[in-house]
Image (cartoon, helix red, strand yellow):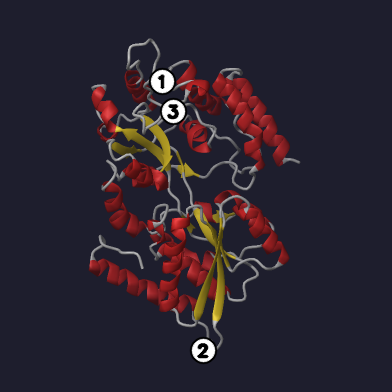
Amino acid sequence: MLSRKVMPEKIRWTLTCLVSLFLLFSFAVPGAQAEEIVLEFAMWIVEPAEIEPTLEIIRTYEEMNPGVKINLIHQPWTGYHDKMMTLGIAGTAPDVMAISRVYLANFVEANLLLPLTKEIEPLLDEIIEIQSGMHEGEIYGIPVWGGPSLWMYNGGMFDLAGLQRPPEVYRQGDWNWDTVLDMARKLTYDRDGDGVIDVWAFESPSTIATDWVAKVHQFGGRVLTEDGKGAAINEPAAIAGLTLWADTVHQYQVAPPWNERAGVGLAQGTLAIYVRWAAEAVSVARVNDHLSLGLIPQPEGPAGSYHIAGGVPLTVSRNTKYPEEAAKFAIWYALYSDQWQLRGIPANRSVVAYEYREMVGEYLENPDAIMHAMSGPHGMEPHAGRVELVSMWDPILHQLRLGNIAPEAAAQQIAEGIEAILNK
C-alpha cells in the first residue's frame, strides 16, 4: 500500500478502527460466504504508470478481505462511458464503475446504478465533496479525483511587478475583481521593448466551464435556472460575467487575443495566472520547479466567491450480484485507500487536512487555498447530464472571445440553444 507519513499514528489508528467497525456493521450479512466473491472494477486510466499502483491498492483490499477478488478493467478516456453504457444496457456492466459527474445523470436515468444514500450518509462529515456524486437527492457514489478549479500563480512575476503576492492580498480581504484587474494591468507588459506585449496576467478566455461559468456566478448569474430546466444565461447578472470574461482581452487587454496566444504560458514565464484544477496542481509544479508557483481562490465578484468543483463518483451497477460487497469496496477505495496519491485530491476531509496539505505545500505556496475554495459557494459544470450543451455553446463563446459578437447577443443565442436542447 502507498505510504502515509504525515497523519499522526494515533489519529490514523483511531480512524482505521472506526472504519473497520462501520464497514463490519454496515455490510454484515447472516451466515458465512462460502463462494469467492469476484467484483469487476472499471475506470479510465490515461497514464500507463498508474496501472500497477492501482493494482497494488486493489491487492491491499483483497488482503484485508479474504474471499474477495477484484478484477480491474481499464481503458483510456475516449469511448469509456459509451462502453459502460452499452454494457449496462446489456446487463453485463462491471460491479463498480467510475462515472464522470457529467455523465452520472444519464446512467441514473437509464436505471443502471444503485443508490448508495443509506450506506454513504453516515460518512458525509468525512467527505470533502458529495454533490457530484448525487442526482435528484440520491447519492450514487463518493467522488474521487476531484476538488475545485482555482488559480495557479507565478509568484516571481508579482515580485518583478512590485506587487504583493496573491495570498497576502487575500488575507487582507481585498481579493476581488477590482483589485485583481488593477494588478493585472501591472502584470501585462512588453518585456523586450519591441512594441508587442509578451507578458500577460491571464491566459486567453477559455470556453471550459471552470473559466467562464465561474465568472457568471461571481457576478450573480447562472447559466441554467436553479431547477436546471431552463436558461438563465441571458439575464443581466449572467451577461455581466460573460462581459468580464471577454473583456479581459477586449477592454482591459490583460489577456492575449485568441489568435495571439502562442508562447504564452506558466512554463515560459509569460503568464502570471492560470485557471487550473487543484487535482493537477502538484503535477504542474513538479515539472516547473524553477518557478515560484502558488494557489489562490478565484477572486470575488459583486455576488461573492464561486468555484467550479467536483469529482468522479465510484458507482455500483444495478446488475451486480454482490451489492453489499460492491458498495463496501467502492467506499473503501474512494475514502480510505491511498488512490489520491495517483491523481486528484483525497475524498477524505481528514486526509486533505494532514497528508495532502503537507504534500501540496512541498511544491506550491498557499496549499490552504484548496480548502478555502471548497468552503465557499461551489458547484458542478452546468452541462452535467446534458453534454450536448457544450457543442452548442462553445462556437458562440468562441465568437464572443474573438470580438465578433456582443455579450448580449451571445447570451441570447446560448439561451435559445439551451431551451431547444432541454425541451426537445
Residue under pointer 3 = 203
Q: Are marks 1 and 3 in contact (CB under 8 Å)?
A: no
Mark 1 Cα shell of 10 Å, populated few (<14), some (14-19), many (≥20): many
196 to 265, vertically: above or below: above
Residue under pointer 1 = 254
Does label 1 or label 3 sit earlier along the sequence?
A: 3
Mark 3 Cα shell of 10 Å, populated few (<14), some (14-19), many (≥20): many
Q: Which of 259 and 14 is in front in this view?
A: 259
Distance between mark 2 and mark 3 Cα atoms: 59 Å
Q: SS of the residue at dot 3?
A: loop
Residue 336 got which mark? none
- Which image quarter is the C terminus in? top right
Give the left or right position of residue 127, taking residue 385 as reference. Answer: left
Does label 1 or label 2 sit earlier along the sequence?
A: 2
Mark 2 Cα shell of 10 Å, populated few (<14), some (14-19), many (≥20): few
| Image location of residue 414, percent across then percent down | 64, 30
87 to 378, vertically: above or below: below
| Image location of residue 369, percent across then percent down | 33, 42
Residue under pointer 2 = 32
- Which image quarter is the N terminus in? bottom left
Give the left or right position of residue 50, taking residue 113 as reference. Answer: left
Q: Do the residues labelled 1 and 2 touch (CB within 8 Å)?
A: no
| Image location of residue 398, percent across then percent down | 59, 26
Dividing the picture into quadrants, the one containing residue 81 is bottom right
106 to 338, vertically: above or below: above
